[in-house]
Image (tube, rainbow, N blue to C red):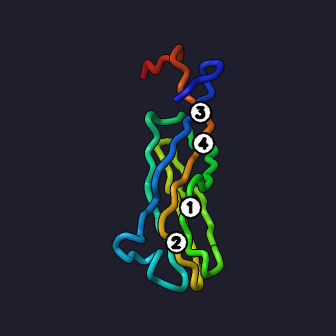
Amino acid sequence: MRRFSGVIGIEQGSRVIFSDFAHDGTMWAGSGPREVRQQQEFAEPFAEPPVVMVGISMWDMDHRVNSRADISAENVTKDGFDIVFRTWSDSRIARVRADYTAIGPTRDEDAWDVT
């Protein structure tokens, strides 16, 4: 985590959410509404839940059907969040990698808890 002014932290990361083409997983071989959810923990906790932005940094999709994708951050806490990828209908998704950025307050190293 990078700290700015001692109290604002930024964490960035990248994660392959799934790779379903090799084993005919649900995202590749299925149809209809589908969802993959991966928990992502922060390297160190924020002081309170940060703002999290998630984007697709790599996708591998079948060109013969429409590409339908929805990606978001859910259940954000000071310790981590869920990366959620959804597709629907006849879309065939082989694999997806997501990048994220979390920005939020950090514990001030000069603040002592004496309780």
For the residue marked with disc 2, what is the amino acid? Ile
Q: Earlier in the sequence, mark 4 or mark 1?
A: 1
At which x and y percent is residue 78?
51, 42
Q: Residue, x 60% and y 62% (percent of image)? A: 71
Please identify the quarter of the rendering in which residue 104 is found: top right
Q: Earlier in the sequence, mark 1 or mark 2?
A: 1
Are the two marked residues, 3 and 4, in contact with CB atoms closer than 8 angstroms?
A: yes
Residue ranking furthest to the top:
110
Q: In the rendered image, which residue does mark 1 sit on?
A: 59
Q: CA distance from mark 3 to mark 1?
A: 25 Å
Q: Earlier in the sequence, mark 3 or mark 4?
A: 3
Q: Residue, x 60% and y 59% (percent of image)? A: 72
Are the two marked residues, 2 and 4, in contact with CB atoms closer than 8 angstroms?
A: no
At which x and y percent is residue 43?
44, 35
> Few, some or many C-alpha atoms within 10 Å of disc 3 (few <14, some 14-19, many ≥20)?
some
Q: Residue, x 48% and y 46% (percent of image)? A: 80
Q: In the rendered image, which residue does mark 2 sit on?
A: 93
Give the number of the disc on residue 10. Answer: 3
For the residue marked with disc 4, what is the amino acid? Thr
Q: In the rendered image, which residue does mark 4 sit on?
A: 101
For the residue marked with disc 1, what is the amino acid? Trp
- Element marked by disc 1: strand
For the residue marked with disc 3, what is the amino acid? Ile
At which x and y percent is residue 54?
61, 52
- Element marked by disc 3: strand
- Element marked by disc 2: strand
Report the front residue among 9 and 93. Answer: 93
Q: Earlier in the sequence, mark 2 or mark 3?
A: 3
When the figure is inspected, residue 69 is found, relative to residue 54, above or below; the finding is below
